[in-house]
Amino acid sequence: DVVMTQSPLSLPVTLGQPASISCRSSQSLVYSDGNTYLNWFQQRPGQSPRRLIYKVSNRDSGVPDRFTGSASGTDFTLKISRVEAEDVGVYYCMQSTHWPRTFGQGTKLEIK
Amino acid sequence: EVQLVESGGGLVQPGGSLRLSCAASGFTFSSYWMSWARQAPGKGLEWVANIHPDGSEKYHVDSLKGRFTISRDNAKNSLYLQMNSLRAEDTAMYYCTRDGDHWGQGTLVTVSS
């Protein structure tokens, strides 16, 4: 199975400051169609997961543009340009190139 | 608006069975891959199974093969997860998802004597 390794696992951030979460895959996530199926999810306390980003850098509908995704090889990054109170929660990367789909361990973002 | 509503969770004894259901609305159900994922209390997310739009292909996580089976009824816009030989470690919130882009609120399964 593809192992997804996130860092940091805990991320205290001051309101209005940027935040960055890293995710590394144990193998290439480039699919035979040329796409890279790397997703980012947000799970607010007590809520279901919500997809923020798909195929590395595409924002889902309704996702604020302060969230951006990028990649360099097997290293992926989710950046929040200015953290707001509503961003508190756990963030997961997930690959959907290979079966089984696998998630990172999660990064807990909290306000400092 | 896409809606996914899970049901069928509850308390079950080890070795027992449960069938989870997911009622879908707001989109053409028969056109989408559908999935189940789960989350043990206080833990991370785990993908469980996927099913092709017409039900012809199914993928289950290896560790659950033989015990869990995903299925669907496109006439009823419904997704199912049959869970047999349940173990304490299967205790989790089970989510129905439209292959990741939309998620239900989940149904809690507790396996305990």
Image (tube, rainbow, N blue to C red):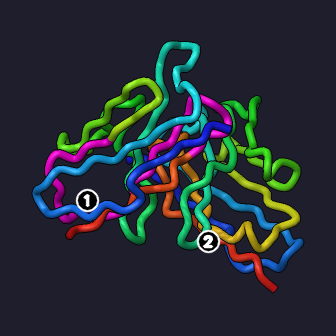
Question: Residue B42 colored magenta?
Answer: no
Residue type, numbered disc 2: Leu
Quadrant of the drawing holding the C terminus of chain A: bottom left
Question: Percent x, y for residue A63?
Answer: 26, 44
Q: Chain of mark 2?
A: B
Dot 1 corresponds to which residue?
Answer: A87
Residue A37 pos. (x, y %):
49, 29
Q: Residues within 10 Å of mark 2 (few under 14, many from 20)?
A: many
Distance, label 2 to label 1, CA atoms, is: 25 Å
Compare residues B69 and A20 and report the one nearer the observer: A20
- Return the residue nearer the eye: B77 or B67: B67
Q: Which quarter of the figure has residue B88?
A: bottom right
Look at 82% across and 68% down and name the residue there: B86
The answer to whether residue A62 is left or right of residue A37 is left
Please name the residue shown 67% across and 34% down the image: A99
Residue A16 in sight in this render: yes
Magenta-highlighted residues: A78-102
Counting from the top left corner in percent of width and height, residue B97 is at 54, 48
Residue at 74%, 38% in the rendered image:
B59
Q: Could you tell me which chain the residue with mark 1 belongs to?
A: A
For residue B70, the mark is none
State whether residue B14 is above or below residue B95.
below
x and y percent of residue A94 in the render? 50, 42
Q: Amino acid at mark 1?
A: Asp
> The residue tagged with tag 1: helix, strand or loop?
helix
Instruction: Kindly indicate whether the residues beneath marks 2 and 1 are on one polypeptide chain.
Output: no
**Residue tagged by mark 2?**
B108
Whether residue B32 is visible to the viewer of this picture, yes or no, is no
